[in-house]
């Protein structure tokens, strides 16, 4: 099993050591190293890779912002010197999270988390459920039970038939996370589960008796998507 | 005398350097250690200079970012206790809003780092001499 990989890391010693570890492993073929996430994004558009070693805090956009912008996401191993990103790493379903500086042994443990992959194909994601942080714990939500998601500024509310869950996040992040999972943003503050829509009206959809606005810019696409559901 | 480049037993790190961690990190390649000590100490010096400028501003978040960026460099030099000190300062920048408290703590950190970098330069010089014998 071999992997093509790119490194996104602005700290030279960290990148040097990582390249060395990759060579030593004999299974990672480093194709490129970038100091900034924007350059890596551009590269991945043209030359997909199986694996992305990604720093989080960098000049320009952060590692997480980069992941949000990727249409097709390779498997990701985060490399950071901060422990506080562990929850985000979990949410982004990265293969592993390495705290710099890490040893070769720890690096090898990371590689064991990888799934066999082909360049350009997204890593398998557990689409059936998502986890959100609620009151300091992780709450599992089956995606089929989510009716819609509502923005509350820096917070997001998940509405299910039985309960509502509020988590600290943005609608933009959530949109990237649930895209292609039968969810669609219909308004700057709302993402709906298209399977839950009972009625489509002019400028709104109805989900279990609740009216949700549909902005003009989204109306045509909502109509198209609902026809195909 | 020929010395096996992958036998770090032949080079004994001075007190204060985490020898076992350095062995794990560089697998006994003392040339690599020398090179990384050089790169890391240069970058750490630049980062501390920049942090000094930021410490005179009123934005702890900017100072924290600079310090955060420099933090792992001390790990690459086998100075894990210094890295912990940097982490503690980073935490302080995160929770403290009084810049005078932050500046005092920065002065203490600066002394720790300067002393550590002096030791690194000395160690780099020892490594250089050692590596010259290898071929």
Image (cartoon, coloured by chain):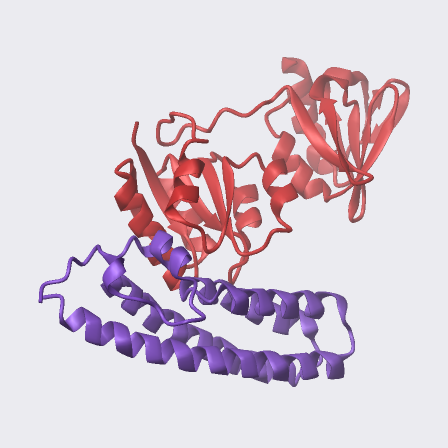
Chain colours: A red, B purple
The answer to whether one can see residue B135 in this image is yes
Quarter location, residue B89: bottom right
Q: Residue at x 31, y 75 (%)?
A: B124
Count of labels in the image = 0
The answer to whether one can see residue B29 in this image is no
Taking the image as shown, residue A43 lies to the left or right of residue A174, namely: left
The image shows residue B99 at horizontal and vertical percentages of 74, 80
Quarter location, residue A195: top right
**B102 or A66: nearer the viewer:** B102
A146 over B12 or under it: above or below? above
Query: Quadrant of the image for the C terminus of chain B?
Result: bottom left
**A152 or B124: nearer the viewer:** B124
Residue furthest to the right: A209
B6 over B12 or under it: above or below? above
B12 over B114 or under it: above or below? above
Q: Residue at x 59, y 26 (%)?
A: A180
Q: Residue at x 43, y 78 (%)?
A: B117
The image shows residue A141 at horizontal and vertical percentages of 74, 24
Q: Residue at x 20, y 71 (%)?
A: B130
**B134 or B92: nearer the viewer:** B134
The image shows residue A42 at horizontal and vertical percentages of 41, 48
Taking the image as shown, residue A108 lies to the left or right of residue A159, namely: left
**B122 or A158: nearer the viewer:** B122
The image shows residue A107 at horizontal and vertical percentages of 41, 43
């Amino acid at each position: 099993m071999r992997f093509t990989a790119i490194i996104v890391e602005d700290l030279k010693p960290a990148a040097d050591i990582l390249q060395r570890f990759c060579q030593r492993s004999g299974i990672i073929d480093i194709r490129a190293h970038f100091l900034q996430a924007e350059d890596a994004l551009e590269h991945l558009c043209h030359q997909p890779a199986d694996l992305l070693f990604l720093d989080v805090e960098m000049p320009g956009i952060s590692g997480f912002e980069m992941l949000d912008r990727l249409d097709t996401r390779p498997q990701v191993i985060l490399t950071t010197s901060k422990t506080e990103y562990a929850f985000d790493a979990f949410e982004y379903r990265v293969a592993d999270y390495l705290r710099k500086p890490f040893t070769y042994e720890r690096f090898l443990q990371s590689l064991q988390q990888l799934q066999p992959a082909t360049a350009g194909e997204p890593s398998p994601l557990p689409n059936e459920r998502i986890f959100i942080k609620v009151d300091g714990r992780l709450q599992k939500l089956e995606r089929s039970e989510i009716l819609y998601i509502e923005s509350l500024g820096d917070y997001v509310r998940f509405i299910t038939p039985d309960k509502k869950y509020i988590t600290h996040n943005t609608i933009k992040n959530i949109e990237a996370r649930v895209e292609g999972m039968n969810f669609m943003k219909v308004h700057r503050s709302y993402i709906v589960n298209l399977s839950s829509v009972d009625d489509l009206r002019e400028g709104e959809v109805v989900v279990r008796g609740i009216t949700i606005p549909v902005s003009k810019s989204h109306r045509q696409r909502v109509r198209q998507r609902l026809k195909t559901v | 005398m020929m010395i096996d480049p992958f036998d770090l037993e032949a080079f004994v790190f001075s007190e204060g350097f985490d020898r076992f961690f350095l062995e794990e990190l560089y697998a006994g390649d003392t040339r690599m250690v020398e090179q990384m000590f050089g790169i890391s100490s240069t970058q750490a010096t630049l980062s501390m200079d920049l942090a000094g400028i930021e410490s005179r501003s009123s934005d702890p978040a900017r100072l924290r970012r600079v310090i955060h960026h420099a933090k792992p460099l001390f790990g690459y030099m086998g100075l894990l206790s210094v890295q912990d000190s940097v982490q503690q300062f980073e935490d302080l920048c995160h929770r403290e809003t009084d810049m005078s408290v932050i500046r005092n703590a920065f002065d203490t950190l600066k002394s720790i780092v300067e002393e550590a970098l002096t030791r690194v330069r000395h160690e780099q010089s020892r490594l250089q001499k050692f590596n010259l014998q290898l071929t």
